[in-house]
Amino acid sequence: MTFTIEIEQEEDGRWIAEIPGLPGVMTYGESAQIAMYRAQALALRVVAERLEHGEAGSEFLTIVFKAA
């Protein structure tokens, strides 16, 4: 699985990081790096939840994050 992280700065100065491949994975941070770390952590939680419920397939996973 390869997930792209889209990062942009809001008008109020906060940074937002979103992973379009995982609906609902959107985080904020004081810096771009913090927003990105939070998005990665949330994405891993979502993937783990899918694995627990048999929604992610049965093969072994390799997860890669890349900035857009």
Image (spheres, rainbow, N blue to C red):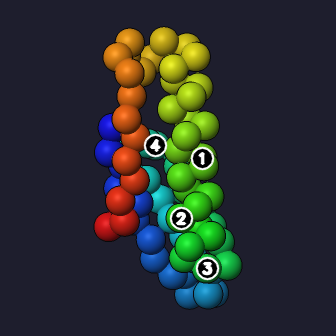
Residue 59's quadrant in the figure? top left
- Nearer to us of marks 2 and 4 is 2
Identify the residue at horizontal 37%, vertical 47% (top origin).
64
Identify the mark nearer the N-term, 2 or 4.
4
Q: Where 47 falls versus 4 (above or below)?
A: above
Measure how far apart labels 3 and 2 are at the Cα level: 9 Å
Identify the residue position indicated by label 1 in the image: 42
Identify the residue at horizontal 37%, vertical 35% (top origin).
62
Identify the mark nearer the N-term, 2 or 1.
2
Measure how far apart labels 2 and 1 are at the Cα level: 10 Å
Q: Residues within 10 Å of mark 1 (few under 14, many from 20)?
A: some
> Looking at numbered disc 4 in the image, what kind of residue is underneath it?
Pro
Identify the residue position indicated by label 4 in the image: 23
- Nearer to us of marks 4 and 1 is 1
Percent position of residue 65, x then y: 40, 53
Q: Residues within 10 Å of mark 4 (few under 14, many from 20)?
A: few
Q: Where 55 falls versus 7 (above or below)?
A: above
Q: Indicate which disc residue 36 carries.
A: 2
Identify the residue position indicated by label 3 in the image: 31
Percent position of residue 46, x then y: 55, 35
Q: Horizontally, is 64 left or right of 11 in the view? A: left
Percent position of residue 15, x then y: 57, 76
Measure how far apart labels 3 and 4 are at the Cα level: 22 Å
